[in-house]
Image (cartoon, helix red, strand yellow):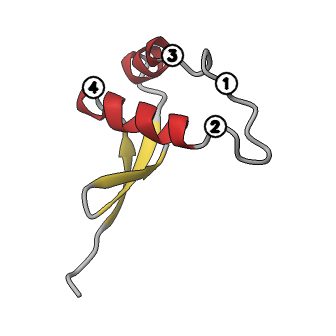
């Protein structure tokens, strides 16, 4: 088993697709109020531009945002 690294950081533009994929993977789970329209890629872009979106990556893969 290799070493893993958990990193908490501000999201960057290069993270947008991974974050959107993470968000979409949660649709339909109990307690998730999101739908196909929200959050949108524009919401992700706006949050990244405003520097108010954070993410957690594990060994380079985004696991939370």
For residue 61, above or below residue 33: below
- Image location (x, y in percent) of residue 22: 47, 41
- Image location (x, y in percent) of residue 30: 78, 48
Q: Estimate the spatial distance between the alpha carbons at disc 1 and disc 2, rounded to whole Å.
A: 6 Å
Label disc, if present, on residue 43 of the rendered structure = 3
Give the residue at mark 1: 35
Q: Estimate the spatial distance between the alpha carbons at disc 3 and disc 4, rounded to whole Å.
A: 12 Å
Q: Estimate the spatial distance between the alpha carbons at disc 1 and disc 4, rounded to whole Å.
A: 23 Å
Tell which circle, 2 or 4, labels the residue nearer the N-terminal end.
4
SS assignment at label 4: helix
Label disc, if present, on residue 7 of the rendered structure = none
SS assignment at label 2: loop
- Image location (x, y in percent) of residue 56: 42, 52
Label disc, if present, on residue 13 of the rendered structure = 4
Residue contact at pointers 2 and 4, CB within 8 angstroms: no
Residue contact at pointers 1 and 2, CB within 8 angstroms: yes
Give the residue at mark 2: 27
Tell which circle, 3 or 4, labels the residue nearer the N-terminal end.
4
Q: Tell me what residue is drawn at x 48 percent, y 28 percent.
A: 52
Q: Estimate the spatial distance between the alpha carbons at disc 2 and disc 4, rounded to whole Å.
A: 23 Å
Q: Is residue 11 left or right of residue 25?
A: left
Neighbor class of circle 4 (other Cα within 10 Å; few <14, some 14-19, many 20+) is few
Q: Estimate the spatial distance between the alpha carbons at disc 3 and disc 2, rounded to whole Å.
A: 16 Å
Tell which circle, 3 or 1, labels the residue nearer the N-terminal end.
1
- Looking at the image, is mark 3 or mark 2 nearer the viewer? 2
């Amino acid at each position: 088993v290799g070493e893993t690294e958990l990193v908490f950081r501000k999201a960057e533009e290069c993270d947008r697709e991974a974050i959107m994929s993470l968000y979409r993977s949660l649709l339909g789970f109990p307690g998730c109020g999101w739908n196909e329209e929200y959050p949108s890629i524009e919401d992700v872009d706006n949050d990244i531009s405003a520097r108010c979106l954070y993410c957690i990556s594990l060994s380079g893969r985004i696991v939370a945002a």
